[in-house]
């Protein structure tokens, strides 16, 4: 049996590139991500702490955990909202309510919280004299009055810090909130007459509509906290209703809704 004839195939020969373009060494570099791969280097302790904080952080839009304990006591957090204008500056800060213990071990609100307004006159361009600041405390009802004002409405609050004491009438504070002539916001005007310190000062500051919107939103949020209702809500447990239903004593609310 004859073997098949072999056919010769001729391939074209391509010329080699010039020697100046030839490189005997051919290197390949592969850059991999630092966030994946089996050979990722071990993070340093500081990096581990940062990663732990990021993994423990809540999703955007959800409240974070309470401040961590330091020395057995919860860390205090101070917040405020400041408005700076040419004639004066205004800082608004909430103040927490006070609680009194009962014999049963429970607590009750002994003093409602408030919002502290601090007015400082200007002494230069974006410079304010906080040593001459005047303060005014807004109660929950006064906050509600400000929030309920119409576009053309105004209000006035009068405070005597020494009311009912021997120095009553010697310090007079009047806070006025009036609409701006062009309707773009409100004027806050604080007048203080202090005969004990021989002070007679008036500080006013314009508040824009946008700033008023921020204040109203902050007031809406903080009012339940000033009343202490948040503390009550945090103590509600699923078994409270069962314990109340099994109680032989009925409160006025039980009688009202039981009719």
Image (cartoon, grey):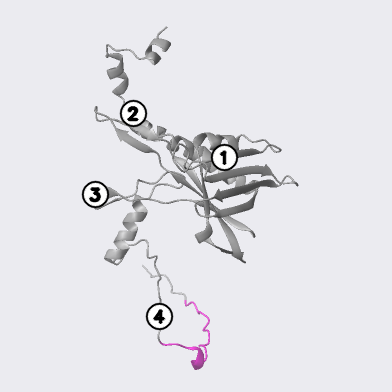
Q: Where the C terminus falls, by quadrant?
A: top left
Q: Quadrant of residue 52?
A: bottom left
At which x and y percent is residue 216? 57, 41
Query: Is residue 173 in the magenta section?
Result: no
239 or 249, which lies in front? 249
Residue 23 marker: none
Alpha carbon distance from label 4 to label 3 = 60 Å
Alpha carbon distance from label 1 to label 3 = 42 Å
Q: Are marks 2 and 3 in contact (CB under 8 Å)?
A: no
Tell which circle, 1 or 3, labels the residue nearer the N-terminal end: 3
Alpha carbon distance from label 1 to label 4 = 83 Å
Please give the residue where the numbered disc 1 appears in the rendered image. 158
Nearest-to-viewer mark from 1 and 3: 1
Q: Are marks 4 and 3 in contact (CB under 8 Å)?
A: no
Q: Residue furthest front?
A: 166
The residue under the point 36% across, 31% down is: 232
Please give the residue where the numbered disc 2 appears in the rendered image. 236
Please give the residue where the numbered disc 4 appears in the rendered image. 27
245 or 138, which lies in front? 138
Q: What secondary structure is the magenta-colored segment mainly?
A: loop
Q: Residue furthest right?
A: 182
Does 80 sit above or below residue 23?
Answer: above
Query: Helix, strand or loop at disc 2?
Result: loop
Please give the residue where the numbered disc 3 appears in the rendered image. 72
Report the span colored magenta.
8-24
Q: Quadrant of residue 250?
A: top left
The residue under the point 53% across, 87% down is: 15
């Amino acid at each position: 049996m004859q073997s098949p004839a072999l056919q010769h195939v001729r391939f074209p020969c391509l010329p080699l590139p010039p020697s100046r373009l030839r490189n005997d060494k051919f290197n390949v570099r592969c850059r991999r991500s630092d966030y994946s791969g089996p050979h990722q280097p071990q993070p340093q302790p500081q990096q581990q702490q940062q990663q732990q904080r990021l993994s423990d952080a809540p999703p955007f839009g959800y409240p974070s955990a309470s401040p961590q304990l330091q020395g057995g006591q919860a860390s205090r957090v101070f917040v405020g909202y400041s408005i700076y204008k040419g004639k004066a500056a205004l800082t608004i800060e909430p103040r927490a309510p006070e609680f009194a213990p009962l014999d049963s071990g429970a607590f009750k609100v002994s003093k409602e919280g408030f919002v502290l307004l601090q007015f400082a006159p200007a002494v230069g361009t974006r410079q304010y004299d906080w040593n001459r600041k005047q303060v005014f405390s807004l109660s929950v009802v006064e906050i509600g009055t400000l929030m309920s004002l119409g576009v053309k409405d105004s209000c006035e609050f009068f405070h005597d810090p020494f009311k009912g004491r021997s120095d009553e009438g010697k310090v007079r504070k009047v806070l006025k909130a009036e609409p701006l002539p062009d309707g773009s916001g409100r004027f806050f005007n604080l007048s203080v007459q202090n005969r004990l310190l021989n002070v007679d000062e008036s500080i006013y500051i314009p508040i824009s509509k946008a700033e008023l919107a921020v204040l109203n939103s902050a007031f809406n949020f903080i009012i339940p906290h000033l009343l202490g209702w948040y503390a009550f809500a945090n103590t509600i447990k699923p078994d409270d209703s069962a314990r109340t239903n099994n109680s032989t004593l009925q409160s006025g609310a039980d009688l009202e809704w039981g009719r």
